[in-house]
Image (cartoon, helix red, strand yellow):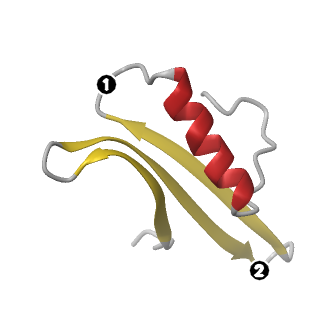
Amino acid sequence: MGLSVPYWIVALEGLPSHGYKAALVYTCMEDLVVGAIEQSFFVLSRTPTIQPEILERFINVAVSLGIDLECENPFL
């Protein structure tokens, strides 16, 4: 059985009546072995590409919430 990790949708692009185009999802959990908090954020899109202004807005939302954006390749 897999580990269940909580997640939060912290930003949406689009309207409920027309379907959302993209979402910013955040998750964090404590690694009890090393005693550190592990954070992840994901940008989910209904299309293979996302407009740069939407991505910039999502990143600004993440920064305003104190989400750590440091990683090797955020667009992997």
Residue at 29% of width from left, 32% of height from top?
46
* Residue bearing mark 1: 47
If the image is split into quadrants, where does the C terminus sit?
Answer: top right
Q: Residue at x 81, y 43 (%)?
A: 70
Q: Nearer the viewer, residue 2 or 44?
A: 44
Instruction: Give the residue displayed 43% in from the left and 68% down from the top.
Output: 2
Q: Distance between the Cα atoms at labels 1 and 2?
A: 37 Å
Q: Nearer the viewer, residue 53 or 29?
A: 53
Disc 2 element: loop
Query: How many numbered badges does the structure rendering display?
Result: 2
Image spot of residue 36 (x, y percent): 83, 71
Left or right: where 33 falls relative to 8 = right
* Closest to the observer, 27 or 63: 63
Q: Earlier in the sequence, mark 1 or mark 2?
A: 2
**Looking at the picture, which amino acid does disc 2 mark?**
Leu
Q: Quadrant location of residue 52?
A: top right
Query: What amino acid is labelled 1 in the image?
Result: Thr
Mark 2 neighbour density, 10 Å: few (under 14) some (14–19) many (20 or more): few
Q: Position of residue 42 (x, y in %)?
A: 53, 46
For mark 1, give the secondary structure: loop
| Vertical comparison of 56 with 4: above or below | above
Q: Which of the pair 17/55 is nearer the observer?
A: 17
Residue denoted by label 2: 32
Residue 53 to residue 68: above or below: above
- The percent position of residue 4, horizontal first and vertical second, equals 46, 73
Which mark, residue 66? Answer: none
Query: Taking 70 as reference, is 56 left or right?
Result: left
Residue at image point 78% right, 40% down: 71
Tags 1 and 2 touching, CB below 8 Å: no
**Label 1: few (<14), some or many (≥20) within 10 Å?**
few
Report whether 42 appears left or right of 18. right
- How far across and down, in percent of the image, does residue 10 sit? 50, 60
